[in-house]
């Protein structure tokens, strides 16, 4: 349930609303907008069903929410959320671009990639140190050594670091080095992992599961927010369909849908979304035009020898070209 307070509600009115909620054995979440305060009621469905709030003084209306997710919903918080990653904002006026190799492979590879993406204008360095590979015989990542390299290059080139976490037991370790914790497509419904990153404050990049509906994806974000972490960024990375020409089908309609349903920012991954480097530039343009808050793109200094996802990685010069396009489209969209 969402309780919308009227413009004229007094602090006493609000206190009365809060008390009624807690007396009923329920919890609440306040969203204090410029215009008005919205109180989200969380907890047992049956208890919420019995709660009568509309008649209290200062209450404009009490709306019963049919979807299970609440904290992530725009009904709960009408204004866009801007996630602040150590001073770099995601979801504000500026388009956030995260770029770098699929996997961290070596110091030289990461240094070359980081230097190139910084020069082209990216604000974030991506790179996997723990790789969730389809085959156990494929390169699994450099683990902590990879995290150290990411931090080193992030500091060297003033880039925020985004990297994937695959294990509940690694939250502290990865948090030590990364600025953003990425939850990969294969772990989107790993609820223990979602709760674990939700207990911290580090921003979380939540990729859409390979065959997740938008509702399942929003509920996954609810798991994170319900633990107290409000810094969630969605990432559309393509879904499984019958099409085989592309690795996945990049669902750009998800950008518009998430913008309608949620206040959280959303970025697009055209590398995993298409699996083909030649399609990254056109789909990046489309993503920004559709209203995405940013992009995450695989860039490798030598894609032909990449240990993972070389086919969907851009060479640095192609990435620089893409960034010019992104700037033009961002301007048309009234963004930077
Ligand atoms: C990645 O970002 O390299 C990755 C493995 O992505 P996804 O989880 O979307 O497949
Ligand atoms: Mn990859």
Image (cartoon, grey):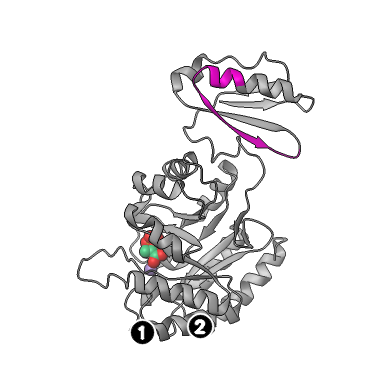
The boundaries of the magenta stretch are: 19-34
Picture coordinates of residue 239, whole percent (x, y): 39, 55
Q: Is 6 in front, or is 331?
A: 6
Q: Earlier in the sequence, mark 1 or mark 2?
A: 1
| SS class, disc 1 | helix
136 or 106, which is in the foreground?
A: 106
**Position of 262 relative to 18 (above/below):** below
Q: Quadrant of residue 267?
A: bottom right
**Furthest residue in direction right, as rendered:** 8
Kindly state the secondary structure of the residue where label 2 is placed: helix
Dot 1, how many residues are within 10 Å of its Cα: few (below 14), some (14-19), or many (20+)?
A: few
Quarter in which the C terminus is drawn: bottom right
Q: Is residue 5 above or below residue 49?
A: below
- Residue at image position (69%, 61%) is 333
Vertical placement of 161 versus 17: above or below?
A: below
Q: In which quadrant of this rendering is ligand 1 seen?
A: bottom left
Q: Is residue 105 visible to the viewer in this orientation of the structure?
A: yes
Quarter of the image where one finds residue 156: bottom right
Mark 1 to mark 2 CA distance (whole Å): 13 Å
According to the picture, the residue beneath numbered tag 2 turns out to be 316
For residue 28: magenta?
yes
Q: Position of residue 331 (x, y in %)?
A: 71, 66
**Residue 50 point in image, percent of width and height:** 51, 14
- Disc 2 crowd, CA 10 A, few/some/many (<14, 14-19, 20+): many
Above or below — where is 226 with respect to 305?
above
Q: Which disc number belongs to residue 120?
A: none
Quarter of the image that includes the N terminus:
top right
| The label number, if any, that marks residue 304 in the structure image | 1
Disc 2 beta carbon < 8 A from ligand 2?
Answer: no
């Amino acid at each position: 349930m969402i309780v919308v307070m009227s413009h004229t509600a007094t602090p006493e009115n609000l206190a009365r609303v809060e008390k009624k909620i807690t007396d009923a054995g329920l919890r609440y979440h306040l969203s204090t907008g410029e215009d008005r305060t919205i109180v989200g009621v969380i907890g047992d469905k049956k208890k919420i069903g019995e709660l009568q709030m509309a008649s209290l003084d200062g209450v404009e209306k009490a709306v019963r929410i049919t979807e299970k997710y609440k904290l992530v919903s725009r009904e709960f918080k009408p204004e866009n959320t801007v996630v602040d990653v150590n001073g770099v904002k995601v979801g504000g006026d500026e388009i956030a671009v995260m770029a770098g190799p699929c996997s961290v492979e070596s110091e030289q590879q990461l240094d070359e990639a980081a230097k190139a993406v910084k020069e082209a204008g990216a604000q974030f360095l991506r790179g996997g140190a723990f790789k969730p590979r389809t085959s156990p015989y494929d390169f699994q990542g450099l683990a902590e050594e990879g995290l150290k390299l990411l931090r080193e290059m992030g500091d060297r080139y003033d880039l925020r670091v985004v990297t994937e976490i695959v294990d509940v037991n690694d939250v502290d370790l990865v948090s030590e080095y990364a600025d953003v914790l990425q939850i990969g497509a294969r772990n989107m419904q790993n609820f223990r992992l979602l709760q674990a990153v939700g207990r911290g404050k580090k921003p979380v990049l939540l990729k859409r599961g390979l065959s997740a509906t938008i509702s399942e994806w929003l509920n996954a974000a609810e798991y994170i927010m319900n633990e107290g972490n409000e810094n969630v960024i969605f990432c559309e990375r393509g879904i499984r369909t019958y099409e085989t020409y592309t690795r996945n089908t990049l669902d750009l309609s998800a950008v518009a849908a998430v913008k309608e349903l949620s206040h959280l920012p959303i970025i697009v991954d055209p590398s995993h979304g298409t699996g083909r480097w030649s399609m990254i530039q056109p789909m990046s343009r489309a993503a920004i035009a559709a209203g995405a808050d940013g992009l995450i793109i695989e860039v490798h200094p030598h894609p032909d020898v990449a240990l993972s996802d070389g086919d969907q990685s851009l060479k640095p010069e192609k990435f620089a070209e893409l960034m010019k396009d992104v700037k033009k489209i961002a301007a048309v969209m009234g963004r930077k």
